[in-house]
Image: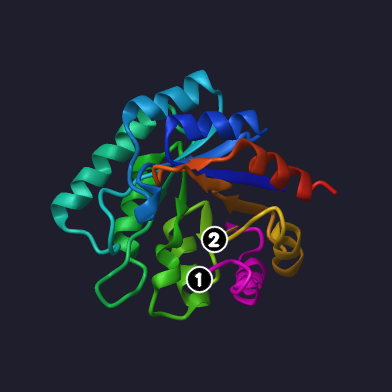
Amino acid sequence: MNIEICTNSRQSATHAAAGGAERIELCRQLEVGGTTPTEEDVRYCVQQLGLRTHVLVRPRAGNFVYTESEFEQICREVEMCRQCQAHAVVVGFLTPDGYIDEELTRQIVRMASPMEVTFHRAFDEILQPPLEALEAIIRCGCHRLLTSGCRPNALEGADTIRQLVEQSAGRITILAGAGITPDNALQIIHQTGVSEIHSSCKHTLPDGTIETDTQIVRQLIKSISQ
């Protein structure tokens, strides 16, 4: 079972590593769903912490329909990740009518190589049938799909996630995410059949800052090794 910890700062990544994490999704501004982290933080996680680092590339909060200038920014940020030797980028593109934007996704898959590409939870906002959208993402060459099964959290979306796992077998990895905790991780794994889970393992500091909690990371890893 592969565990990905979503971290929104260099400090959170350090806490994740201290808790036993080997892989992170690195971003910033987690309170708005995440945006692209700084080059310095990417380099730190890859080179200093030695973590398998998947980098969220998202220029702003809000929807996943991007202007030409925003897509150009995304391309620059993907290239930055490649130069930093990140292991993967995490992106998501939708058309104005709520379908997977295959053209933009294909461009990023080509540009990102040899990095892997994860299509993120933009998938959970689609207006097309989930299994149809899955096929579009596979056609684009993505390596992984992060999803809550088009529901608010992975436990509620477990039935859809299982369908995605079954249909995608051997072609793409389904990464279950949203609301996964040490208390429900094993249940979600059993109900969905996923081989990877994504969790923030976060707590909120008195000043409102969201930060990864080392102890929760440890608990999560322990909960699925029983």
Q: Which residue is mark 2?
A: 178
Question: Residue 124 bears which disc, if any?
Answer: none
Q: Nearer the viewer, residue 188 or 93?
A: 188
Is label 2 in a helix, a strand or a loop? loop
* Percent of width and height locating residue 46: 48, 26
Classify residue 59 as left or right of residue 201: left
Q: Residue at the right extreme?
A: 226
Classify residue 29 as left or right of residue 119: left
* Percent of width and height locating residue 173: 60, 55
Q: State the colouring used for the structure image.
A: rainbow
Classify residue 176 as left or right of residue 59: right
Q: Residues within 10 Å of mark 2 (few under 14, many from 20)?
A: many
Q: Nearer the viewer, residue 98 or 135?
A: 98
Q: Nearer the viewer, residue 90 or 12?
A: 12
Is label 1 in a helix, a strand or a loop? loop
What are the residue bounds of the magenta stretch? 152-175
Residue type at mark 1: give it. Answer: Pro
Marker count (numbered): 2
- In magenta stretch: residue 223: no
Q: Which residue is mark 1?
A: 152
For the point 32% across and 75% down, the residue is 98
| Residue 84 visible in the current orientation | no
Q: Residue at the left extreme?
A: 69
Residue type at mark 2: give it. Answer: Ala
Q: Is residue 178 above or below residue 47?
A: below
Q: CA distance from mark 1 to mark 2?
A: 7 Å
* Percent of width and height locating residue 84: 39, 26
* Label pair 1/2, CB-CB below 8 angstroms: yes
* Percent of width and height locating residue 17: 60, 30
For the point 64% across and 45% down, the residue is 3
- In magenta stretch: residue 174: yes
